[in-house]
Structures are given as structure tokens and as C-alpha cells.
Amino acid sequence: MEQKRYGHFDDQHREYVITDPQTPWPWINYLGNEDFFSLISNTAGGYSFYKDAKFRRITRYRYNNVPMDNGGRYFYIKEGDTVWNPGWKPCKTPLDFYECRHGMSYTRITGKKNGVEASVLFFVPLKKWCEVQKLTLKNESSEVKNLKLFSFEEWCLWNAATDMENFQRNFSTGEVEIEGSTIYHKTEYRERRNHYAFYHVNSPIQGFDTDRETFVGLYNAFADPQAVMEGKPRNSHAHGWSPIASHYIEVTLQPGESKDFVFLLGYIENEQDDKWESLQVINKKKAHALIAELDTTEKVDKAFAELCALWDDLLNIYQVKTGNDKLDRMVNIWNQYQCMVTFNFSRSASFFESGVGRGMGFRDSNQDLVGFVHQIPPRARQRIIDIASTQFPDGGCYHQYQPLTKRGNNDIGGGFNDDPCWLIFGTVAYIKETGDFSILDEMVPFDNQPGTEVTLFEHLKISMNHVIENLGPHLLPLIGRADWNDCLNLNCFSWDPNESFQTTENVSEGTKAESLMIAGLFVVTGKDYVALCKKLGKNDEAARMQAAVDAMIAAVKKDGWDGEWYLRAYDFYGRKIGSNENDEAKIFIESQGWCTMAEIGAEDGMVAKSLDSCKKYLECEHGMVLNNPAFSKYIYEYGEISSYPEGYKENAGIFCHNNPWVIIGETLAGRGNDAWAHYSKILPSYVEEKYQTLHKVEPYVNCQMVAGKDAFKPGEGKNSWLTGTAAWMWYTVSEFILGIKPDYDGIRIDPCLPETANDYTVNRKFRDAEYEITIHPNGAQKGVKSITLDGQPVDGTVIPYSAGKHTVEVTM
Ligand code: BGC
Ligand code: NOJ
């Protein structure tokens, strides 16, 4: 059954086009690539920040508000008694036309009313600390139009957390300066802050406002600000309370005439000893310079063209042509785009992550790396070093760190025993992509303490050691606070709702809680580590770790198999979890994914049985659920997992992140039909076609969780954008389904496809080479028969790397 549609893909422009502003949930986009970032919804809601969504929040946003998506960059257009916004909100005046185009790091919102078109292009120019809002007003009627234009932004008092709570202070600190067409926000600049923000427009203004209550009116709303309704700015000067920035411009347009206005929301940092121009007057030199770089339509258009060119380059590194639009648009555009966004934001700021709770996750960031390493290797390199610098000397690590300071986050601490393995996963992906082994010699500190540096290779070694030094009674890895599943807290027994499941580890003494997920992860990353050691000629180390891997495989075969699938864990007391013996949650997905990826017991049929069990017990219409059956009650010994109602999140939700693990397992087993069936179920473009209303969240990206079969509304999505699903979907399709896998000495070609697959071509830039690879599947699901490189037969499945342009033909 097809549902109401709110938009469609425009592949040629690499945009998603929203045609109805009343989407089932705000459908957002991200602006910015390096330091200055913004979130923007399809009605222009959202906010901006510099580097860190918690500590440098530039504009204010009200999460979970009524109405939804409250606060943003709003343009009010008043003509006679009619007031409207190009993005429909906040006035919600019915528009004659509405369209929002979310593209690669930009958004264009267009509204029309009574013969006037207002179109706003939002983007963050490369290497600049500002958001551009280019507003074009066009008179499409045959009469002269006299319009009153009001802009609006509300300042956040920098720390997004205290901004929401410390009102006894906040209501007295707000300070602004107004100079020409620029409104400066300088709260706390008088003391320790060396930064301020500004909101500028490249035209004369006929008035302004900087005090929220004066502009909006205490008992009015963003939908009917007094100044706008009366068509009169107040020229207010904020002192304390809530500073805002609003320009007032009178615009006359002849029939057919159009005018551009470039609005700039900027962020400036000054040296401590160069903060002031004179007493209480901020030094605006850098602001003036930034404004001068973007004060005309031509300059802005040039900056926009540069941004688009960057995306051409980034996306052209991997392009596939299969003839299946739904697959091609995800692989070539949206999946890669989402990977870049997760790289930039980790799990900090979305419409489900408030930007104040979490910084960068250790495991999250390592996994995100496989999604973007082909696009920006130097930044992946830096990311690896940053992550490794938050490790402890025993191989354990901070679970999260703050992007601004790069320091480990003490509130959450460490003790998540899967974390160390992910460092190997990320580093190996980086070296295979780049061939840059020198990263292993980088000197990297522990816990960011100068003087403690050892090589990155040493960090990898202690990461592996951390697992083997923390084994439980079945010689399986101890789980610690949790493994990948942050909610399986087997050492936290809590009846106190004020305790955090993540940080409470009150019974770890004498624990027998072991994880089969870490066991599988250890075998996969252990094999990678062994191969790396051999590559480096460290044969003793390779042999040492191979023995540990073999021992782990033996332990899983002996005590990790339940007959039809891999167990999930042993609890604190050493009792089975994820076993047919349990009343509920008899089977979990994570251990099926990792143990099949590790191919543990493949020779005994364990892998095939496990994959079959996933189909039989976990699969449903919208993907595979995390566990089955769902927990129907809270289990004191298991922690957060059973705190969720059935079908949501870690309690039998379709946690999209882990579906690709099973899909990769399927591809390694050569089961292309099954791999494709699982993959296409959670591929956004397939969901988009059928379920826009039910799915609710953005149809162009994956979300973290889709409600599972036991939920009230199976198929409803939540937590869109910031999820490891992005990187895993990319890794799965690019390397395991389409089968183009970077390796130390070249590219390994090993697709696994549905029988129905047609010939396809992948254009892959790799180091200093460019390959055009055409695959002829001939109805096979797996198995490369022959490869030619520039017409010459190749032995095996790795095309050896050499710089330059190459043509590759692959017959399966
Ligand atoms: C969520 C997890 C998340 C964890 C840590 C839990 O409430 O269910 O998905 O990883 O919090 O933030
Ligand atoms: C979200 C967290 O960011 C990630 O680290 C975790 O693995 C999953 N939730 C599963 O709990």
C-alpha cells in the first residue's frame, strides 16, 4: 500500500525535494564541513554552532517544543496585512507554492505568496565560519510590490546546557552591539570568552531589534511577533534577558524585478590581548573582513560553486552504475553524504540528539571512519590519532570525548569492553585505503597526557591485549559496562531510577558476565591485526595473536553455541543469555552478525544455521529485530535493555546499525539473494517509495531504529541521521555486495549479488589510481572466475595497485 508522499528524489541535482511543509516529522539537513555547522529543517528551523554543539552554540533552539521545531532563521515578509514566511513556518500562512530542496551541505527553501517569490539558499562556505542565507525576492506579478522584510535569529548564550537552565544568571548577562547593518552578540565577551557572533545583511536597513520581548511581545509567539504584525521595528537594544537579531528592510519591487539580500551569521575569535577596540567596544576587524568576503551575490555564488565542486570531488571517488536508480542514488549520493555527516557530528547534534549530552564516541567514531575514509583520508588520520589519544595505558579507553577539547569525557568514563577493538577496525580501514603505514609510527599519548606517548601500533597491541587480559570463566571476553549494545548492562543491578545504566557498575566484582559479540569482534579484528603484523614483518606478534584468535574461536565453538544460533552472553552469575533456554530474548542479532562475520564454525555448519535463524526469528517486513521475543518485563540483572517497551530501541527494535553485520555474514557465506533481501529492506530509497507517512523521519537517510514487529507501529522510524548505520550500510554495499574492497596492495574484487543482478560498473578512485571496473555477474551470487586489468589477465582477486587510469573486467 503506497502512502501519502511529501517529496521525491532529484538525482540529477543530488537533492531531495520536499513539496509539502507539513512532513510527518521535521526533515532536516546539515550545513558545514569543518568548523562551523548548522542543522536546518525543511521549514528553516534549527541552529548553528562552532565545532561543539554544547560549548559553542551560536543560536538558540528549543528541543521537543510545542509546536514542534521551534526556533530557526526566519524571514517574515509583510505585504499589507499578510505576513508569510518562505518556509511556511512560523506564521504558517498558506503559501501558493512551497518547496524545500535539501542538497549536499546546502538547503534551498522557496515560498510564493500573492505574486512574490522568496527563495533562500542556506550554506556554510568552505573554510569560513559563517552561515550564508541568500534571500532572493522576486515580483512575479504585474503590480509594484511594497514589502516589509524582517529577519530573525535568537542568540544562544554559548553553553547550550546552561543556556537551558541557569536563568538566574542568564537573564542578566546578555549584551549586543549594533553597527550599521550588523548586529553583534557579545554576551560574556567582557570576561573569559574570546569569541562573539554577528548577524549581517549586505544592504542598508531601516530598523532593527535585538531584544526578544520587545520584538516578539511577551505574550506573542514566533508566529505573530508584535513588531512584524504592526510592521514597525522597535530599534531595541538588548540588556540581559534574551538577545536576538532582527533586521528590518523596506523593499520595493517592480513587476518582474528581483533582488538579492545576503544575510550572514558569523562567528569570530580574537586573541586575548586584541579583544577590544575601546572600552566595551569589541574589535570587529575580523568580522568586517569576513563580511567583505561575502557581501555581493557574485561572491556568494562563487563560494557556493566551490562547495558544490567539493561535493563533486568527494562523491566521484566511488560511483556505481547498476541501472537500478534506488540503489545508485543511495550508493552514489545519500549514503556517502550521511557518512560525512556522521563523521562530522558523531552522535552529538540531530533532532534526536540535543547536542549537550554526548560528544564523540570511541566506538562510534571508529566505525564512522569506514564511511568516509575514501573521501578525506587526512582527516580520517587525524581522527584516529584523536581517538587513540583518549586510551588508557591498560588498553581500556574513554567511551566518549569532547570535540572542542578532544579530552576524554569523565562523566561517562570507560569500561565498555568492545571499545578497544574498534581502534583496530578503524586503523586497518585507513591503511588499506591509503597505503599509509606511517600512521602506525605516530607517537600517541594516553589520556592526552604529554610524556606518555607510544606508537599507534603499540595502542593497537594493547587494544588486543585488553580483550585477552579480560576473559571470563568460559574464556570469552568479559563484557564490562556493556559491549556494542550500550543497554546490555550485565554488571549494573539497579532499582534506582536516578542511576544511569551506563555508568552504574555496582556488582562487577566477581562477575562472570561475558560477551559473544566481543568474541566475534575480537576474531574479526584479530585476524586483521594478524595480517597487519605479518605485513609489517612482526611474525612473533602475529603468531601470538593468531593463537589468541584460535583460542577464542575454540571458546565460541565450545561454550558460545546454542544449537541453532550463537549465544549472546553469559550474565553476572554465568547464566546463558540469548538461548533457547531463556523465556524471552532467546536470540540476539549482534552475536549472529559478528560470529558469522568471523566465520566461526563455518566448517561445522554453524554460520549457515545462524544466518537461517536470523531469517526465521529476527526478520520482519521492515528489517531484522535486535532480539526475539522482545522482553515483556524489566530484568534487574540485564540493565537498560529491558527498560524499553517491546519493539523499541534495544528491546527488539530494528536497530538498523546491526543489520549490515548479518548481511556481511550472508555475503561471506555467498548467499547473495538473502544479503540483498535484508539490505533492500532497510535501504532508505526502498522505504521512501512505500512508507513516507509510517516511517515518519527523513526518507533520504537511514535512522538508528525502526520500530520492530512487537511495537505498536512496526515500521515507524526514529533517531534519524546520526547512526553507525550509515557507515555500515556503506561498507556493506560498497565492499561486500558490489565487492570493491581496498586492500594493502590493491583492490580486492569479490561481489556477492542477487541472482537477478545485471552487469554494472564502478568507477573507483584509489590512492593515485582510477579504476573503471565492470562486473559481469552472469547470474552468479558469488565467485569471481576471471579478471582482466587493462586487457591482461590477473591472478587471483586482487588487482595490484599502480597509479594511473585502468580498466578492469570481471567475470563471475
Ligand atoms: C540508548 C542507546 C545509547 C545509550 C548511550 C541508551 O539510552 O538506548 O542506544 O547508546 O543510551 O547514550
Ligand atoms: C547508540 C550508541 O551511539 C552506540 O555506541 C551503541 O553501540 C548503540 N547505541 C547500541 O546501543
Image (cartoon, grey):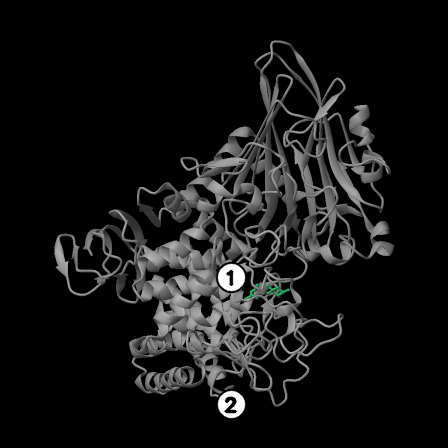
Residue extending furthest toward the top:
142
Looking at the rendered structure, the kind of residue marked 1 is Val
* Residue 386 higher or lower than 566, as above or below: above
Where is mark 1, residue-wise?
Answer: 625
- Residue 41 location, quadrant: top right
Residue 401 in the image, given as x and y percentages of width and height: 60, 67
Q: Secondary structure at mark 1?
A: loop
Queried on whether the Cβ of the residue with tag 1 lies below 8 angstroms from ligand 2, the answer reads no
Instruction: Tell me if residue 159 can be seen.
Output: no
Quarter that holds the C terminus: bottom left
- Position of 738 with respect to 115 (left or right) is left
Residue at image coords 30%, 52%:
764
- Residue 641 location, quadrant: bottom right
* Residue 32 higher or lower than 465, as above or below: above
- Picture disc at residue 473: 2
- Quarter of the rendered image showing ligand 1: bottom right
Residue 611 in the image, given as x and y percentages of width and height: 39, 67
Pick whichever, 74 or 233, lies toward us: 74
- Picture disc at residue 21: none
Residue 511 in the image, given as x and y percentages of width and height: 60, 87
Mark 1, mark 2: which one is toward the viewer? 1
Queried on whether the Cβ of the residue with tag 2 lies below 8 angstroms from ligand 2, the answer reads no
Q: Secondary structure at mark 2?
A: loop
Q: CA distance from mark 1 to mark 2?
A: 29 Å
- Residue 531 location, quadrant: bottom left
Pick whichever, 254 or 586, lies toward us: 586
- Position of 85 with respect to 794 (left or right) is right
Instruction: Tell me if residue 293 can be seen.
Output: yes
Looking at the rendered structure, the kind of residue marked 2 is Pro
- Point out the tag, 1 or 2, that comes first from the N-terminus: 2
Query: How would you rate the neighbour count of disc 1 (Cα within 10 Å): few for under 14, some for 14-19, many for 20 or more?
Result: many
Query: How would you rate the neighbour count of disc 2 (Cα within 10 Å): few for under 14, some for 14-19, many for 20 or more?
Result: few
